Image (tube, helix red, strand yellow):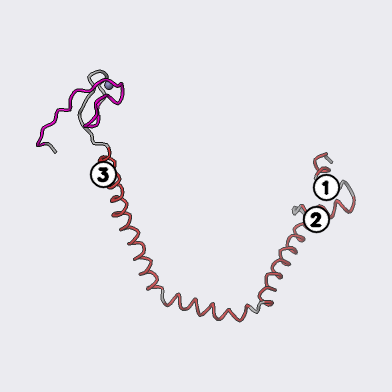
Amino acid sequence: MSHANNALGKPLTGWRLQIYTVIFEADTRAGRWFDQALIDVRILRLLRVFRVFKLTAYVSEYQALGHALRASMRKIMVFLTAALMIVLVMGTLAVPTGIVTAEKTYTRRSPVTTRTCQECLTEGHMPDANFCRHCGARLPVYARDTNAP
Ligand SMILES: [Zn+2]
C-alpha cells in the first residue's frame, strides 16, 4: 500500500478494504452490482415524483399537446421560414446601412484635402489648418478652386 492511498482514506486491510473496493471501485463484480443498485434506487426515486405529484394525470395533456404540434407543423414551418427571412433581410439591409452611415459620419468629421507639408511631406491636413499636424511647420495657403465641391 502506498502512502497516497492511505492519505485518501483507503483502508489498508480487512473487511473495510472490501467495503471500500465495492463502493469506490467499480472494476469488480460486486462494485458493478453496487453501482447498478444505486442507479436503480435513483430511478425509483425519480418515478416516485410522478406518484407524489400525480403527474400521470398530465400525460394525456402532454399527448394532446404533441398531437396539436404535429397537426400544425406546416404553420410552424411557415412561421420559422418567415422569421429566417426577416433575419436575412435585416442582415442584408440594416447592417450595411449602418456601416455606410458610420463611414459617412467619419469622412464628414475629417475632410480629406491634398494639402501637403513642405517640410515633412505629411498629407491630409484640414482645410483651415495653418500648421502641419505632424511637424508643426507653417503650411502654405490652401489653394482651392471656387467651383470645386
Ligand atoms: Zn510637416
**In terms of depth relative to the viewer, which is nearer, 12 or 121?**
121
**In terms of depth relative to the viewer, which is nearer, 72 or 108?**
108
Based on the displayed image, in which of its 4 quarters is residue 130 positioned?
top left
Q: Is residue 98 above or below residue 128?
A: below
Name the N-terminal-most of marks 3 and 2. 2
Residue extending furthest toward the right: 14
Name the N-terminal-most of marks 3 and 1. 1
Q: Is residue 91 above or below residue 115?
A: below
Q: Amino acid at mark 1?
A: Lys
> Is residue 59 toward the left or the right of residue 11 in the image?
left
What separation in Å lies between label 1 and label 2 (alpha carbons)? Answer: 12 Å
What separation in Å lies between label 3 and label 1 (alpha carbons)? Answer: 73 Å
Q: Is mark 1 within 8 Å of ligand 1?
A: no
- Residue 30: image location, x then y, percent: 79, 58
Q: Amino acid at mark 3?
A: Lys
83 in magenta: no
What separation in Å lies between label 3 and label 2 (alpha carbons)? Answer: 73 Å
Q: Amino acid at mark 2?
A: Val
Q: Is residue 140 above or below residue 18?
A: above
- Residue 135: image location, x then y, percent: 30, 21
Based on the displayed image, in which of its 4 quarters is residue 45 positioned?
bottom right
Comparing labels 3 and 2, the label whose residue is closer to the camera:
3
Tag on residue 10? 1
**In terms of depth relative to the viewer, which is nearer, 127 or 6?**
127
To which residue does mark 2 refer? 22
126 in magenta: yes
**CB atoms of marks 1 and 2 within 8 Å:** no
The stretch in magenta equals 123-147
Based on the displayed image, in which of its 4 quarters is residue 77 positioned?
bottom left
> Is residue 41 toward the left or the right of residue 114 in the image?
right
To which residue does mark 3 refer? 104
